[in-house]
Image (cartoon, rainbow, N blue to C red):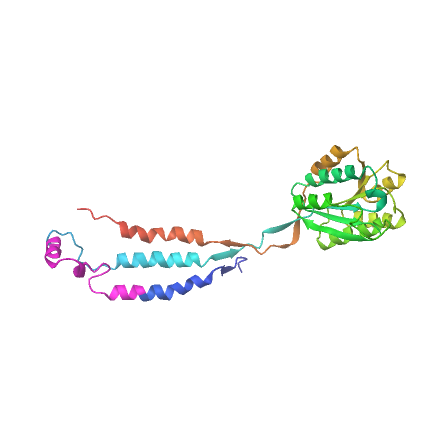
């Protein structure tokens, strides 16, 4: 059995076939053929034209059949006959970046807070074609912007973060990282990056466990330190298969996102339902019967 299947993408165009048949039959039964020149032309002029052998009085059906055939083939082409391509593979974007930003008082009231926001904007500008998302946390964590390709809006949201963004006091980075892990799983982004912007407050066994889960999911956890990074930063980066950046590494950070974290594609384990429209090729066939309408009589 053939692996190819044929279907019609726009079957409603076939409703024109009965109308075409009815019009064709009506034109065929009219006296005088397709043009019916005997009714439209002066009888004396028609007799003179026939005497000069300038009128085809054979009542041939070829022109009518040629025209009807061309219109019929055009209707078939418009109906969209398509062949199923089962061998076609589907692809999906596996690379996304989630920015997890600490907006607790110890971070937002720091003099280096504007510099941290600037570094975040540099990171967003380096995303290229990858989607990005923004998660904020303090004593609790929230999704500020879900995964999106609108990097302008993402950067604007990041710029508006301040001490009032998260009303819950404290610093619970494990909650922000847990939300990031959930988003990666739900979006099936299994080769992305999670970037944690923090001063190190709240890093401990819980965050270290989530870092390992992010790595197990195929993503990477990297950290941006507000001040000089403590040893816990390197520990978390190692568990999350990522890197540690300081606010002095703005160019290195953006270059790392742009070059070493490029968009990755993976072939799905199921075939994409793909139909190849064959209507354009039928339109080419409609040209052949039209050639009969332009045949030239050779004296």
Horizontal placement of 197 versus 266: left or right? right
Query: Left or right of 179: which side holds 80?
Result: left
Name the spot of residue 12 as percent of width and height, x first: 45, 63
Q: Is residue 184 visible?
A: no
Residue 40 belongs to the span the image colors magenta: yes
Q: What secondary structure prevails in the magenta region?
A: helix
Q: Is residue 218 left or right of residue 266?
A: right
Q: Is residue 108 visible?
A: yes
Q: Quadrant of residue 255?
A: top right
Q: Nearer the viewer, residue 162 or 226?
A: 162
Residue 62, by quadrant, is: bottom left
Up-down: is 279 above or below 222? below
Camera-side residue of 65 and 126 = 126
Which quadrant of the figure has residue 270? bottom right
Residue range (magenta): 23-50
Q: Residue at x 26, y 63 (%)?
A: 27
Please give the name of the residue rendered at 76% of the width and 49% of the height, measured from the top-left corner. 135
Residue in front for this viewpoint, 152 or 26: 152
């Amino acid at each position: 059995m053939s692996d190819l299947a044929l279907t019609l993408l726009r079957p409603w165009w076939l409703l024109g076939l009965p109308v075409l048949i009815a019009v064709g039959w009506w034109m065929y039964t009219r006296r005088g053929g397709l043009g019916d020149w005997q009714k439209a032309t002066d009888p004396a002029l028609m007799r003179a034209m026939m005497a000069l052998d300038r009128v085809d009085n054979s009542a041939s059906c070829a022109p009518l059949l040629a025209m009807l055939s061309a219109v019929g083939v055009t209707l078939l082409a418009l109906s969209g006959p398509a062949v199923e391509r089962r061998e076609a593979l589907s692809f999906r974007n596996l690379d996304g970046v989630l920015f997890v930003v600490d907006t607790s008082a110890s971070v937002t009231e720091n003099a280096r807070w504007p510099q941290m926001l600037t570094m975040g904007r540099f990171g967003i500008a380096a995303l290229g074609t990858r989607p990005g998302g923004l998660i904020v946390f303090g004593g609790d964590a929230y999704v500020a912007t879900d995964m999106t390709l609108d990097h302008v809006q993402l950067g604007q949201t990041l710029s508006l973060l301040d001490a009032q963004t998260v009303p819950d006091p404290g610093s619970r980075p494990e909650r922000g990282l847990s939300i990031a892990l959930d988003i990666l799983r739900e979006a099936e982004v299994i080769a992305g990056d999670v970037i944690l912007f923090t001063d190190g407050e709240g890093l401990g066994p819980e965050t270290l466990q989530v870092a390992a889960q992010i790595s197990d999911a195929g993503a990477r956890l990297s950290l941006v330190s507000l001040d000089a990074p403590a040893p816990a930063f390197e520990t978390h980066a190692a568990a999350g298969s990522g890197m540690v950046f300081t606010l002095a590494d703005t160019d290195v950070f953006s270059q790392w996102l742009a070059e070493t974290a490029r968009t990755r594609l993976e072939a799905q384990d199921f075939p994409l339902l793909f139909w190849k429209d064959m209507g354009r090729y039928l339109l080419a066939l409609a040209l052949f019967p039209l050639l009969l309408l332009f045949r030239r009589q050779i004296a």
